[in-house]
């Protein structure tokens, strides 16, 4: 690997592509063209092929013979199962987080919250994805239990496997901002039920968005029929 590509290996490119998929650069159904990726990320075709193969094996993208690699979307069942697993683990971690929080740990949570807010003000989807994961990693670390935090982080970051729901509209962004603020306030006040409630609202917000979209489509169809 020459000097231009040092530090940009397959693992690095996989991480960049996952962020791009979750942040809106590569929406579901889009094709990942090797020549375009080479120019965009400054890596060799060897690195690109390896990263695409690994992402395909992980289920983030699909390989279409004679066409290339295409971004897939989470199915409803995949998102439901991941949400259920996260709820079970993260709600159970709340008492530990409140019992073991430290000033330094809370400072890391606040800093990640602020980074997310700055990214949201720019409507920078990829920066929002990075800051959002930093926020939740800092939250998990408050529990003072490495294996639990690692498992929570692993489950959460499965959301980077493919094109996720993201923040499709201003209302969704504002809701995420408020949920982050509610979590930090509950942490500061030591309120178990408030923190669990904020986490639950945050993890299940995609269901509300999906229901709103379904209701909107139904109303539109009814208007056309009339």
Image (spheres, helix red, strand yellow):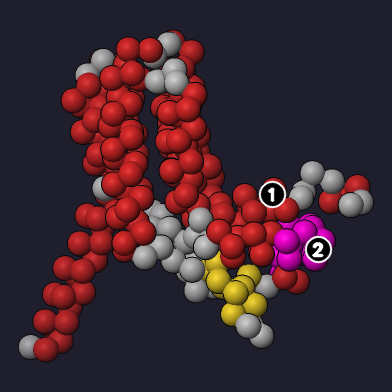
Residue 37 % position (x, y) = 71, 65
Vertical position of residue 187 compared to residue 11: above or below: above
Residue 44 in the magenta stretch? The answer is: yes
Vertical position of residue 37 compared to residue 132: above or below: below
Residue 223 % position (x, y) = 12, 82
Specify whether residue 28 is in view: yes
Seen at 22% across and 21% down, the residue is: 192
Q: Specify the farthest residue to the right.
A: 2
Seen at 56% across and 52% down, the residue is: 19
SS of the residue under disc 1: helix
Q: Quadrant of residue 181?
A: top left
Residue 116 % position (x, y) = 46, 38
**Which residue lies under the disc numbered 2?**
46
Spatial CA distance of label 2 from label 1 is: 13 Å
**Which residue lies under the disc numbered 1?**
11
Tell me the magenta residue range.
36-50
Question: Residue 218, which numbered label?
Answer: none
Q: Quadrant of residue 221?
A: bottom left
Seen at 43% across and 43% down, the residue is: 155
Relative to the observer, which residue lies in front, 147 or 221?
Answer: 147
Residue 148 in the magenta stretch? The answer is: no
Seen at 36% across and 50% down, the residue is: 82
Vertical position of residue 171 compared to residue 76: above or below: above
Few, some or many C-alpha atoms within 10 Å of disc 2 (few <14, some 14-19, many ≥20)?
Answer: few
159 on left or right of 185: right
Residue 99 % position (x, y) = 32, 12
Q: Earlier in the sequence, mark 2 or mark 1?
A: 1
Q: Quadrant of residue 49?
A: bottom right
């Amino acid at each position: 690997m020459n000097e231009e590509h040092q530090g940009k290996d397959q693992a690095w490119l996989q991480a960049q592509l996952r962020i791009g998929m979750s942040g809106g650069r590569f929406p579901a159904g889009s094709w990942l063209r090797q020549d375009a990726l080479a120019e965009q990320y400054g890596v060799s075709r060897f690195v690109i092929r390896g990263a695409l193969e690994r992402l395909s094996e992980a289920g983030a993208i699909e390989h279409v013979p004679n066409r290339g690699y295409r971004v897939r979307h989470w199915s409803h069942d995949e998102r439901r199962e991941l949400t259920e697993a996260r709820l079970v683990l993260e709600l159970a971690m709340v008492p530990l987080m409140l019992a073991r929080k430290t000033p330094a740990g809370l400072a890391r949570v606040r800093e990640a919250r602020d980074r997310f807010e700055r990214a949201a003000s720019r409507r920078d989807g990829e920066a929002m994805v990075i800051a959002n994961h930093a926020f939740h990693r800092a939250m998990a670390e408050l529990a003072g239990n490495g294996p639990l935090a690692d498992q929570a982080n692993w489950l959460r970051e499965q959301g980077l496997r493919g094109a996720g729901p993201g923040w499709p509209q201003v209302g969704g962004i504002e809701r995420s901002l408020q949920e982050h603020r509610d979590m930090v306030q509950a942490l500061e006040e030591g309120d178990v039920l408030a923190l669990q409630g904020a986490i639950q609202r945050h993890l299940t917000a995609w269901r509300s968005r999906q229901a709103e979209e379904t209701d909107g489509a139904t109303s539109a169809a009814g208007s056309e029929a009339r």
